[in-house]
Image (cartoon, rainbow, N blue to C red):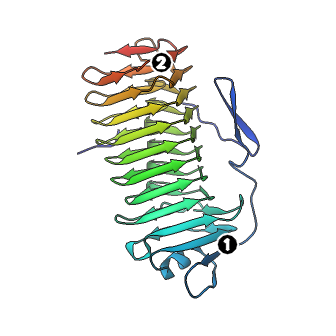
């Protein structure tokens, strides 16, 4: 069983950059200028006709198809087992799935569904669970941008008992009560070569909230400039496990656990090339870098934990 637990966010304009440890991470395609080209979706299966919404194309799709998308597709789409497996490909940087701020996740993947999504910007969702994406199936995101979505749980992505893989993507400027960028609940999430930045949680996990016996792996990724009350960059809670390899958690802010909060019963493993630096908690004994609760497991593995304020690691 698990329960919901969620300071200064930043919205990036087109061409903006994120500074983490002196490294400039380009966000030129994030919050890109509005594209007025209308939505056009083409199926790989017969009939080869263009659809005006992604939802229409998905409803007509059979398993094993590829949908090519261009322009701005408004509204929300649910992918059911009838369309699985499914590949959705954006044709250019102007390909957007825009929820228009209406209730519901922009993209919902049901249990038992396998979907590969690439080259899309998913924005302006407003869901209870998952503003941009709600996933209960098997989802792979490649070269995508998940931005400016809102939800009670999982502002950018809510991964519940599913399998989520994120490759070379941005999850930025999303907000929620818990899991501003990503909420991973009793699920498996793998983040490769990606950026989780400028997300905000009112309570737990500004960048990522990993709970309910969830398993999270961060590889060659950065978690920066996120804010929350607990776990500015990452909140590792409710008997969950997080593994960091060659990844950086920097510039995050929280009352407790500026970089990471590792809750009782949970485990945090840091590879030797990972860094937790320049994060800040609100007061002494609040864990600027890591707030490590009694009864949790912390393996530093030679990782760099440095220049966090008011202290690098506080153990209760």
Image quadrant where one finds the C terminus = top left
Q: Examine the rendering and report whether any part of residue 132 can be seen.
A: no
Residue under numbered circle 1? 39
- Residue 64 is situated, as x and y percent measured from the top left of the image, at 47, 74
Residue 143, relative to residue 91: is it above or below? above
Residue 304, relative to residue 263: is it above or below? above
**Which one is nearer the viewer's eye here, 243 or 74?**
243
- Residue 246 is situated, as x and y percent measured from the top left of the image, at 52, 30
Q: Examine the rendering and report whether any part of residue 110 can be seen.
A: yes
Q: Residue at x 45, y 48 (%)?
A: 154
Among numbered discs 1 and 2, the one appearing first in the sequence: 1
**Which one is nearer the viewer's eye here, 266 or 310?**
266
- Tell me the distance, in whole angstroms, between the alpha carbons under discs 1 and 2: 45 Å
Secondary structure beneath label 2: loop
- Residue 169 is situated, as x and y percent measured from the top left of the image, at 59, 47
Residue 288 numbered mark, or none: 2
């Amino acid at each position: 069983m698990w329960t919901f637990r969620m300071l200064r966010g930043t919205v990036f304009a087109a061409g903006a950059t994120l500074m983490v440890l002196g490294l400039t991470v380009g966000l030129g395609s994030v919050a890109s200028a509005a594209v007025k080209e209308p939505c056009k979706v083409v199926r790989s299966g017969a009939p080869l006709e263009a659809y005006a919404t992604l939802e229409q194309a998905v409803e007509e799709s059979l398993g094993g198809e590829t949908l090519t998308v261009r322009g701005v597709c408004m509204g929300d789409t649910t992918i059911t087992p009838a369309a699985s497996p499914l590949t959705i490909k954006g044709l250019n940087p102007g390909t957007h799935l825009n929820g228009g701020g209406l209730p519901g996740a922009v993209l919902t993947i049901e249990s038992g569904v396998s979907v590969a999504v690439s080259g899309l910007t998913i924005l302006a969702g407003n869901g209870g669970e998952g503003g941009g994406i709600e996933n209960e199936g098997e989802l792979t995101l490649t070269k995508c941008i998940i931005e400016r979505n809102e939800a009670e749980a999982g502002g950018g992505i809510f991964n519940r008992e599913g399998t989520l893989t994120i490759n070379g993507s941005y999850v930025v400027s999303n907000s929620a009560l818990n899991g501003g960028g990503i909420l991973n609940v009793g699920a498996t999430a793998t983040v490769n070569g990606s950026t989780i930045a400028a997300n905000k949680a009112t309570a737990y996990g500004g960048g990522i909230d990993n709970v309910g016996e969830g398993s999270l792996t961060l590889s060659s990724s950065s978690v920066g400039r996120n804010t929350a009350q607990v776990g500015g960059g990452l909140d590792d809670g409710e008997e969950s496990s997080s593994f960091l390899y060659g990844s950086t958690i920097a510039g995050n802010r929280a009352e407790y656990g500026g970089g990471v909060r590792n809750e009782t019963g949970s485990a945090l493993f840091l590879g030797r090339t990972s860094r937790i630096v320049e994060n800040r908690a609100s007061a002494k004994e609040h864990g600027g870098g890591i707030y490590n609760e009694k009864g949790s497991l912390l393996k530093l593995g030679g990782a760099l934990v440095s220049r966090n304020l008011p202290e690098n690691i506080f153990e209760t």
